[in-house]
Image (cartoon, rainbow, N blue to C red):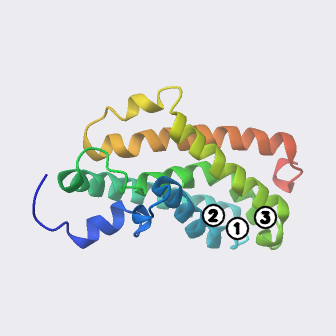
């Protein structure tokens, strides 16, 4: 660990715009940041645009997260709890199936939307905390890659479970 001051930009990214400083459950705070930042996308009314923008955010912030998390380890030690960009990206992955709500009028006024959004948060945090089916193994990758990879896999598992549940238990137009 270095005694120099941690530069602002990589710290800002690694902490998911400061959410990592939240004292009670910084990982959940990072996931909630992902959720809040994603909400404007679903309001576009455009399914393809919502999916593509979400995928773009995932790609860009995965690379920024790997870079900034690697730098954070130099200042804060291995896999520091303040690094939560991995949770933000993992939550975006889990929320991909929620993009279908872009096809509904005023999704934020829908109780169904908020129910499935909450389910996405619970699913992602479950897979992130319990770390089943190879998620824990991803942490063994070096540096920022390992920090990001376990949450990416947790997000994929969350998205698959969410998509299946939504298919089985909703009547959204996209399933017709």
Q: CA distance from mark 1 to mark 3?
A: 6 Å
Dot label at residue 138? none
Residue 56 visible at all: no
Name which quarter of the figure residue 149 lies in: top left
Which residue has dot 2 on it? Answer: 50
Give residue 10's position: percent from left, percent from top.
27, 65
Q: Residue furthest front?
A: 24
Residue at image mark 1: 46
Describe residue 152's horizontal placement relative to residue 120 as left or right: left
As drawn, which residue projects farthest toward the top? 133
Q: Secondary structure at mark 1?
A: loop
In front: 65, or 119? 119
Give the mark nearer the N terminus: 1 vs 3: 1
State which quadrant residue 75 falls in: bottom left
Under circle 2, the secondary element is helix
Can you identify the residue that label 3 sits on?
103
Does 170 sit left or right of 79 as displayed? right
Secondary structure, mark 3, is helix
**Residue found 39% across the figure and 46% down from its top:** 148
Looking at this view, is 5 or 61 the one in front?
A: 5
Mark 3, residues whose alpha carbon is within 10 Å: few (<14), some, or many (≥20)?
A: some
């Amino acid at each position: 660990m270095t005694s120099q001051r941690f530069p602002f930009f990589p710290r800002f990214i690694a902490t998911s715009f400061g959410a990592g400083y939240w004292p009670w459950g910084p990982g959940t705070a990072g996931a909630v940041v992902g959720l809040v930042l994603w909400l404007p996308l679903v309001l576009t009314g455009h399914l393809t645009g919502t999916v593509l923008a979400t995928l773009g955010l995932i790609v860009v912030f995965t690379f920024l997260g790997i870079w900034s998390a690697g730098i954070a380890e130099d200042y804060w030690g291995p896999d520091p709890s303040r690094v939560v960009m991995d949770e933000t990206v993992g939550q975006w992955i889990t929320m991909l199936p929620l993009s279908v709500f872009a096809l509904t009028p005023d999704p934020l006024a829908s109780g169904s939307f908020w129910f499935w959004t909450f389910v996405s948060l619970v699913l992602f945090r479950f897979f992130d905390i319990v770390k089943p089916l190879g998620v824990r193994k991803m942490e063994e990758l070096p540096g920022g890659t390992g920090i990001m990879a376990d949450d990416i896999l947790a997000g994929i598992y969350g998205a698959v479970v969410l998509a299946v549940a939504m298919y089985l238990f909703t009547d959204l137009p996209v399933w017709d």
